[in-house]
Image (spheres, grey):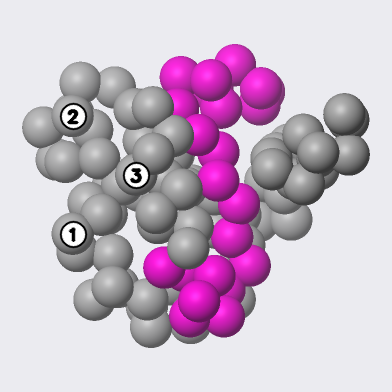
Amino acid sequence: MFSILKSLFGKPVDFQSVLNRGAIIVDVRSNGEFKSGSVKGARNIPLDQLSSKVSELKKTGKPIITVCRSGARSGMAKSILANAGLEVYNGGPWISLASKIS
């Protein structure tokens, strides 16, 4: 049973370690949603604009952690960035990630 869940959700990510390696947190919600609160230091790139920012993110050479409100858009963002060859992690809901990092 555990192996089935692991295959569906992947292994747990130590987000603090990823941040310690210089990761950039990208909040893919709309500008209005972002203004209502986000993870400290997050960069707002709405999902519908993400494809146009891939080369800019690649140039940083840093891992990316995507976040949104529920985890759905951040999952889509992860797929876009992973397909472009970036090291990317789905942080899920921004409020959840904020509680996991110091």
Q: Residues within 10 Å of mark 1 (few under 14, many from 20)?
A: few
Q: Along the line of sight, which residue is nearer the eye, 99 or 4? A: 4
Would residue 4 be visible to someone looking at this image?
yes
Q: Which is nearer the N-term, disc 2 or disc 1?
A: 2
Please check the rendered image and state whether residue 87 is part of the magenta-colored stretch, yes or no.
yes
Q: Which residue is mark 3?
A: 73
Q: Is residue 46 above or below residue 30?
A: below
Q: Would residue 33 appear left or right of 86 to someone viewing this image?
A: left
Q: Residue at x 20, y 21 (%)?
A: 36
Q: How many residues crowd around disc 2 within 10 Å: few (fewer than 14), some, or many (20 or more)?
A: some
**Pointer 2: what residue?**
33
**Count of residue discs:** 3
Q: Position of residue 65 (x, y in %)?
A: 54, 49
Q: Quadrant of residue 6?
A: top right
CA gap between label 3 and label 1 equals 10 Å
Left or right of 44 in this view: 83: right
**Residue drawn at the location 59% of the way across and 60% of the way down:** 88
The local crowd at label 3, few if under 14, some if 14 to 19, many if 20 or more residues have their Cα within 10 Å, is many
CB within 8 Å, label 2 to label 1: no
* SS for dot 1: helix
Residue 79: x %, y % from top left: 48, 63
